[in-house]
Amino acid sequence: MTPSDGAADTAETHEASETRTAAGTETPGETETAAGTETAGETGAAAAEQDRREQELLERVLRSYDDCADPRLKELMGALTRHLHAFVREVRLTEEEWQKGIEFLTRIGRITDDKRQEFILLSDTLGASMQTITVNNRAHGDATEATVFGPFFVDDAPLVRLGDDIAGGAPGEPCWVEGTVRGTDGAPVPGARIEVWEADGDGFYDVQYADGRTAARAHLFSGPDGEYRFWAITPTPYAIPHDGPVGEMLSAVGRSPMRASHLHFMAVAEGYRTLVTHIFVRGDELLESDTVFGVKESLVKDFERRPAGTPTPDGRAVEDTWSTVRFDIVLAPAEA
């Protein structure tokens, strides 16, 4: 068949189709096809118009920051607006969902006070806290990785000497902790201030009790060769506060409020970047599901349990089992 033959056949077919249509004999399929073509065209035009309206709104909001005198604030607000609008457009947020979101944030504000920061808890459980820490503590040589600060740090924790016990009567299995503080150049860091704090064997921090106790927290200073050592409590898992909006969110999405067992550290020394970190217990079943995403493989340590009656490093008499762990802290230079 030649192209002209095909064109002729097409013309004849079209003419026959028009004759059938005029006679009222068109088939349902032909009617639906025509209607479908028209609808598809209309849908395409409507979609383009919808996209234009959404984009025009975004650009208007971004232009509203043009007179902002603070370049960093302008950058932050612009990026926040772009990402927020992108989220709304990507998920096609409904007005009902928007309202529920506003109610959720309002409830977070209402439960927050000077003792409970539900917004930080939300940030933690969304991984925003951990991502902010990761961004601001850039990798530098073999410097120890940072992790979340947590809500239970207290200024002016008691001073203890090297080898003392920070437990302060808190329940739990005794744990001997030792290590060194050095720079990424390998040089020891004497006199580094080391803050340590943890939950007790029942899974609570001292500040969660109503009696004003101080327990399972202290600060000490590294020795002349950067060495440090102290008695603490073998870390145990515990749940973050989950009786509020954030807890409801975790439950709704099928997540646990549990944190993996850990011991907090903060190391401060002149000329070095302040380090806030934890160490975690190898073998803890919660390492992969820590609800604030604080676990890093380099921070998982071997807490070796010793049988009752085993001699301790400093000669302390321990009637029951105890554990021991080593954690060598490496500080990045302040300018890193």
Image: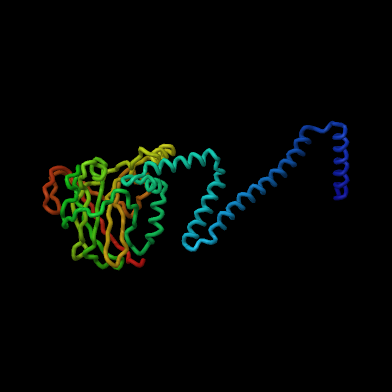
Q: Position of residue 12 (x, y in %)?
A: 88, 41
Quick check: 76 left or right of 265? right
Q: Position of residue 153 (x, y in %)?
A: 28, 51
Q: Residue at x 22, y 53 (%)?
A: 157
Quick check: 205 left or right of 69? left
Q: Quadrant of the C terminus?
A: bottom left
The residue closer to the viewer here, 223 or 1, is: 223
Is 189 located above or below residue 197 in the figure? below
Quick check: 303 left or right of 106? left
Q: Residue at x 50, y 54 (%)?
A: 80
Q: Position of residue 203 (x, y in %)?
A: 26, 42
Q: Quadrant of residue 10?
A: top right
The residue closer to the viewer here, 200 or 100, is: 100
Q: Quadrant of residue 93?
A: top right
The residue closer to the viewer here, 225 or 111, is: 111
Total labels: the figure holds 0
Is 262 located above or below residue 66 in the figure? above
Q: Position of residue 306 (x, y in %)?
A: 18, 46
Quick check: 72 left or right of 218? right
Q: Residue at x 28, y 65 (%)?
A: 183
Is 307 located above or below residue 56 in the figure? above
